Image (cartoon, helix red, strand yellow):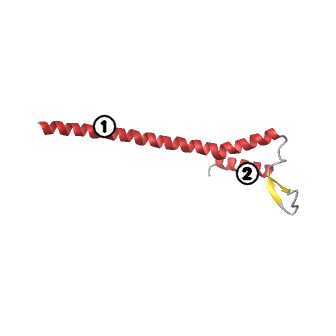
Amino acid sequence: MNNSQETGFYFCHHFQAVIYHEEQHPVFPWFDQSVTFNSFPSPAHELVYNLFNLAFMYLLPLIVIIITYSVIVLEMSRKSRQSRSEYSEVFRRNQKSNKI
């Protein structure tokens, strides 16, 4: 890993360590769970946190996959058209040479 990746990793890791905390279940006090609620000063902050996570865990990878596969399909289409035009040119030349 390079330095910027390590910095990003440590920033995200320590940020999550601050957000997540342990709380007891109201009905089953023996059950503790790591949660994010009651960690933010307002519901708006929690909404921004949830939208940020949604975007970076689901939407960004989906967009990257769609763009990548679109580029692959376009390249394959271009190569196919190029190959077809070269084949038709060779076919035309063969037709002309057979007529002579």
* Alpha carbons under labels 2 and 1: distance apart: 54 Å
Q: Which residue corresponds to mark 2? A: 13
Q: Is residue 43 left or right of residue 6?
A: right
Which of the two residues, 28 or 42, is positioned nearer the viewer here?
Answer: 28
The picture quadrant where one finds residue 48 is top right
- Mark number for residue 85? 1
- For disc 2, the neighbor class at 10 Å (few under 14, some 14 to 19, many from 20) is few
Q: Earlier in the sequence, mark 2 or mark 1?
A: 2
Q: How far across and how far down the image is residue 58, in percent?
A: 64, 46
Residue 32 x %, y %: 83, 60
Q: Quadrant of the C terminus?
A: top left
Give the residue type that dot 2 points to.
His
Q: Secondary structure at mark 1?
A: helix
SS at mark 2 in the image: helix
The quadrant in which residue 75 appears is top left
Nearer to me, 63 or 12: 63
